[in-house]
Amino acid sequence: MRITSFALFAAGVILLIFGLSASDSVSSDVSEVVTGAPSDKSIWLIVLGVIALLSGAGTLFAGRRR
């Protein structure tokens, strides 16, 4: 359980980094100019990264309390 939680936490960090990097890309800038919002890819990477990060951190810290 602890290894899975750490892997989920690490995956969340990686997804978040990729999402923030994708939001600074040229294609995301073009999409933002046209639609007024960042690209769907960067939004999904950031959202999934935050979810995975919080899930991994929550299970890591919840496991310590027991």
Image (tube, rainbow, N blue to C red):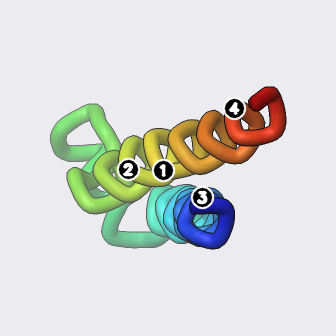
Mark pair 4, 3: CA separation: 10 Å
Contact flag, marks 4 and 2 (Cβ < 8 Å): no
Where 58 falls versus 53 (above or below)?
above
Residue at x 30% of width, y 45% of height: 33
Please give the residue where the numbered disc 4 appears in the rendered image: 62
Asked whether disc 1 touches disc 2, contact meaning CB atoms under 8 Å apart, the reply is yes
Q: Is residue 24 visible?
A: no
- Asked which quadrant contains residue 10, the reply is bottom right
Disc 4 from disc 1: Cα separation: 15 Å
Quarter the N terminus occupies: bottom right
Mark with earlier residue (4, 1): 1
Q: Mark 4 vs mark 3: which is more N-terminal?
A: 3
Q: Position of residue 32 (x, y in %)?
A: 31, 45
Residue that label 1 marks: 52
Q: Amino acid at mark 3?
A: Ser
Amino acid carrying mark 4 in the image: Ala
Residue at x 76% of width, y 36% of height: 61
Q: Mark 3 sits on what residue?
A: 5
Q: Which label lies toward us, 3 or 1?
A: 3
Can you tell which of label 1 and label 2 is closer to the viewer? 1
Residue topped by disc 2: 48
Q: Secondary structure at mark 4?
A: helix
* Residue 66 visible in the displayed image: yes
- Spot occupied by residue 58 in the image (x, y as percentages of width and height): 63, 35
Image depth: mark 4 or mark 1 in front: 4
Q: Which residue: 58% across, 38% down?
A: 54
Q: CA distance from mark 1 to mark 2?
A: 6 Å
Image quadrant where residue 36 sits? top left
Secondary structure under the numbered disc 3 in the rendered image:
helix
